[in-house]
Amino acid sequence: MLALPPIPRYSYLVSKQQLVSSNMPAPTKPPVTGAHPRVVVTPSPSACPIQRIAAVKTTHHDAVASREAPRTNSHASNSALQTAAPQQSDRYKWIALSNTTLGMLMATINSSIVLISLPAIFKGIQLNPLEPSNVNYLLWILMGYMVVSAVLVVPFGRLGDMYGRVRIYNLGFAVFTAASVLLALDPFMGAAGGQWLIWWRLVQGIGGAMIFANSTAIITDAFPAHHRGMAMGINQVAAIAGSFIGLIVGGLLSVIDWRAVFFVSVPVGLAGTIWAYLSLKEVGTRNPGRFDWAGNLAFAAGLTLVLAGITYGIQPYGDSSTGWTNPWVLGSIIGGVVLLVAFVAIELKVAEPMFEMRLFRIRAFASGNFASLLSSIGRGGLQFMLIIWLQGIWLPLHGYSYEDTPLWAGIYLLPLTVGFLLAGPLSGVLSDKFGARLFATLGLCIVAGTFVLLLVIPVNFEYWQFATITFLSGIGSGMFGAPNRSAIMSSVPADQRGSASGMAGMLQNSGSSLSIGIFFSLMIAGFATDLPHALTNGLLAHNVPAATATQLGSSAPVGILFAAFLGYNPIQTLLDQSGTASTLNPADVSALTNKEFFPQLISAPFQSGLTVVFTVAAVMTLVAAAASLVRGRRYINGASSLAAHDLAAAAAKADGGVDARGAIADASAPTATDGRTPEFTMAGKDTSE
């Protein structure tokens, strides 16, 4: 019979940051008389698979025994065991959190700052965005940054795992800052100026993708598990609040000068880049290997085609008010889906994939990311609809000129930002103790409720109603964002954190890109039913010739919506383009082009569109809440690699009665001696929730 070498039974934790390899002399097992540092088995890499599985199983029984022991303070026992490598500096983890939070805030502000500054930008480069030939400039200045950052965030996450997360993050800061300088220095006007902005927004998106992909992985590397919720809370508040703050900053700066919209990132970017290169260091586990070219190309091409197809789907095609019957749009979306399916097949077969699809077997990871995607789509759609609502209808009805509506729209959306800033950090801290499921699920339910409330109030609402609802929406988003991202990042092995951060960032950024195409199309679907009749009758009532009124009334709804979104008076534009203004008496021209006529005209059609949009958004958010609910109890993956995770999962499943998701216990979570609820996470299962 083949004789196997003896199986090492124990390997003890000698500091809260380092595991002693099992090929070192094992210390004597301490008596179970009090709460000692948890026992974590780490078999030697040279041990055979049977030894490694047996070691993990042995640890489970000992960890259970330690949990059942009396919880008395055994300070001497703790002190005797902590003899190895020093802990990661407390100062460093705060430096890492501060710098990555600054980077995330800068990157996300720039995803929405242009959203509200487009009127000033197009006036600055002397380009009319409502002319049919200029719609592409409008779409790509608006969407290019989001599309690129969504497509490249996963590859840059993998590169961070291979070559160092800090290295890729620092490069991203530098690229982003350089692109911001060149955007602000656009030397051209007209179409050339628009092309310059598009190309450098794409480059800015590359830098943003590097930041998105690695910031949360750097934080996860720097912080122990029992403080990650707090750290992620701060970081994710910056990440999501940046999209709200960008609306306010964009509104303020666009009044001063359109170049200031891009210049504002330059001093922050320069300071952040220098600070990052001087202070951040590699402390995480690398996962070197070959670059997966086939997987990267399939993923990038597939996601680009899907996002571009959905973006162009909002443009009219033929007699249709949208472009969903356009063969190019359909071919782009179908082709993109085929390539994404091919990407999954490639990743499951290659030896060193760009992204480990096996991570989706971890329920906490899969559920959290699915909820994040749906939540991001709903949040992006909410921002887009609220801007149209305020700039196109409510503000003009209350006496604001169209030129000033971007600024005041940002100001009136402050309750949304305040609610998020209040709830985000607090929910992150509380999720460290109680887990993510309660806060994330309840937060999404609150957001779904606010979509319903927005359907109830009239188009010309009282502001206190709007402020209360948007404040509650911000509270709900804050309760979801930080706990959910912390749970996602804590659920994966250490060597997969860059890829996991990239995947989470990709889904969040893709949701923002998808939201504009999806909700704009839904709004047009509801809008187009009543708009032609309302517009034609309104023009006839002010002596516009019947033939002209019918022609203008059948104008594409997308043009009307874009005008409202950009703060233009579309009636003035329609009359000028048709040459009708010169044939009408001054009283009729004044009535047609004043601040109240257009908002009153589209209020009823807009209400129909809002009903469709917010109903879909509420349903989508409730589905996200259901996904959050089934994520399971708090799950901290202490495995150093995916291979160790799989071994632990197999051992736990063979042992029976233990969570088969399988992860080695987290070495840095608190023990019963510090007054907190113990978080024994054998096989990734936490008992504290």
Image (tube, helix red, strand yellow):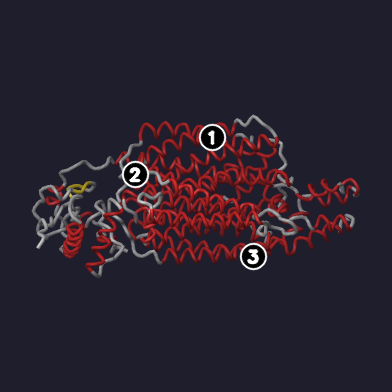
Q: Secondary structure at mark 1?
A: helix
Q: Is residue 150 above or below residue 4?
A: above
Q: Quarter of the image for the C terminus: give it.
A: bottom left
Task: Name the residue at the front extreme.
Answer: 1
Q: Amino acid at mark 3?
A: Thr
Asked if the residues shown at circle 3 and circle 2 are in contact, with their CB atoms under 8 angstroms apart, the answer is no
State the separation of the CA atoms marked 1 and 3: 40 Å
Q: Which residue has dot 3 on it? A: 611
- Between 482 and 676, the one lying in front of the other is 482
* For residue 240, side relative to residue 27 (left or right): right
Kindly indicate the quadrant of the structure image that contains residue 331: bottom right
Asked if the residues shown at circle 2 and circle 1 are in contact, with their CB atoms under 8 angstroms apart, the answer is no
Q: Amino acid at mark 1?
A: Ala
Q: Amino acid at mark 2?
A: Gly
Q: Position of residue 615 (x, y in %)?
A: 59, 66
Q: Which residue lies at the image location 71% right of the left edge and 55% below the top edge?
A: 317
- How packed mark 1 is, by other alpha carbons closer than 10 Å (few <14, some 14-19, many 20 or more), is many
* For residue 253, side relative to residue 71 (left or right): right
Q: Secondary structure at mark 3?
A: helix
State the separation of the CA atoms marked 2 and 1: 30 Å
State the separation of the CA atoms marked 3 and 2: 51 Å
- Between 235 and 327, the one lying in front of the other is 327
* For residue 157, side relative to residue 330 (left or right): left
* For residue 187, side relative to residue 5 (left or right): right
Q: Earlier in the sequence, mark 2 or mark 1?
A: 1
Q: Between label 1 and label 3, give the one nearer the viewer.
A: 1
Q: Which residue has dot 2 on it? A: 289
Q: Position of residue 461 (x, y in %)?
A: 66, 59
